[in-house]
Image (cartoon, rainbow, N blue to C red):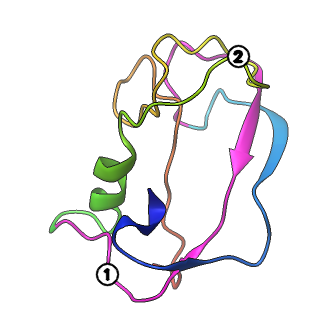
Amino acid sequence: MLELRSIITYETSPTVESVDVKNLNFGSAYKGKQKVWTFRFSTDRSGVYHDGYSEIGCLIDDLHEVPIIQNLTESVNILKPIFDLQNLETKNTLVKAIKGTI
């Protein structure tokens, strides 16, 4: 999904760690220590995910509600098997832009 609008590059593979999700802006349904995956990447051109309001708005739209496979190694009970980037209760995916990379 990341490459719908751009070619991405990355130096390290995605990583996972157990962290307290209290202040990370996940949905309110998720509490305590959970497995959190991090994937840092760059695009082949700047502004590719800008939607006129946010520099990552198009990426959020592209990822939101994409189906996922449940019961792998996640540590939370995902209510709907999707990447959820919008619901205040069930948001299970976060996207952040790091200055100079998008």
> Given the image, on which type of amino acid does mark 2 rest?
Asn
- At x 45%, y 27%, the residue is 82
Percent of width and height locating residue 30: 60, 17
Magenta segment: 25-51
The secondary structure that most of the magenta stretch takes on is loop
Percent of width and height locating residue 56: 35, 63
Sequence-first disc among 1 and 2 = 1
- Helix, strand or loop status at disc 2: loop
- At x 84%, y 41%, the residue is 17
- At x 67%, y 59%, the residue is 39
Percent of width and height locating residue 90: 45, 19
Q: Which quarter of the rendering shows the C terminus?
A: bottom left
Percent of width and height locating residue 33: 79, 23
Q: Which quarter of the rendering shows the N terminus?
A: bottom left
- At x 50%, y 17%, the residue is 28
Q: In the visual, does 43 lie left or right of 38?
A: left
Residue marked by disc 2: 71
Q: In the visual, does 42 lie left or right of 19?
A: left
- How many numbered markers are drawn? 2
Residue marked by disc 1: 47
Q: Residues within 10 Å of mark 2 (few under 14, many from 20)?
A: few
Q: Nearer the viewer, mark 1 or mark 2?
A: 2
Q: In the depicted view, which residue is nearer to us: 91 or 74?
A: 74
Queried whether the magenta region covers residue 46, the answer comes back as yes
